[in-house]
Image (cartoon, grey):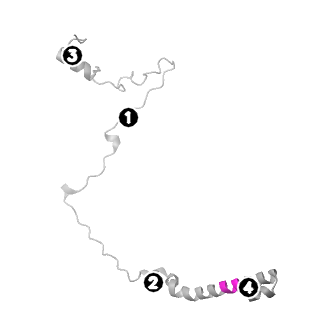
Amino acid sequence: MFLSLHLTGKEFSNIISVCFRKYHVETEFEAAKKWSIKWGFLTTPFEELIKDERKEPTKPKIELPEHLQIRPVTPVEKYIKVYPSPLIPKTTQGFIGWRSSVPGLELERYYQIRSCKGAFHKDLKWPDEPSD
């Protein structure tokens, strides 16, 4: 307060800024002294840090009996065979169902399509329409 009575506003702000700078410089100087105590371990080389760590001994490979060994993977091509599709027909009407019309590429099996309801209905010999 005593300084503020004899100084103008500009001189007063200069003195305050000098005090703040001095405080920051002192704080940085103290932090630089304490850094090696707190964080000095970061300057040691990595190899020196891990030299005390033990490596676990590797386990020896045990030869399994033949019936417990894993068989090699069978390629998918042995079980799934995808035949190439024939050329697309030139007409637009022939485009629909063109793949299933080729023998060997058809989706139906045993040349008969049965729905579950129809098969069950005929086996029990029920009438087609319910009666009252």
Task: Residue under label 1, please give it.
Answer: 82
Task: Identify the mark at residue 18; answer none if there is no mark.
Answer: 4
Inter-mark Cα distance, 3 to 2: 85 Å
Task: Residue under label 3, please give it.
Answer: 122
- Disc nearer the start of the sequence (3/2): 2
Inter-mark Cα distance, 4 to 2: 45 Å
- The residue mark sitting in front, 3 or 2, is 3
Q: Does dot 3 land on a helix, a strand or a loop?
A: helix
- Disc nearer the start of the sequence (4/3): 4
Quarter of the image where one finds residue 82: top left
| Mark 2 residue type | Glu
- Disc nearer the start of the sequence (4/2): 4
Q: Would you say 100 lies left or right of 114 here?
A: right
Depth check: give the residue in front, 43 or 23: 23
Task: Residue under label 2, please give it.
Answer: 48
Residue 23 lies in the magenta-colored region:
yes
Q: Does dot 4 land on a helix, a strand or a loop?
A: helix
- The residue mark sitting in front, 2 or 1, is 2
Inter-mark Cα distance, 1 to 4: 85 Å
Relative vertical location of residue 91 with respect to residue 49 in this rendering, above or below: above
- Disc nearer the start of the sequence (2/1): 2
- The residue mark sitting in front, 4 or 3, is 4
Q: Does dot 2 land on a helix, a strand or a loop?
A: helix
The C terminus, quarter of image: top left
| Mark 1 residue type | Val
Inter-mark Cα distance, 3 to 1: 36 Å
Q: Would you say 29 lies left or right of 56 here?
A: right
- Disc nearer the start of the sequence (3/1): 1
Residue sitting at x 47%, y 80%: 46
Within 10 angstroms of label 3, few (less than 14), some, or many (20 or more) residues? few
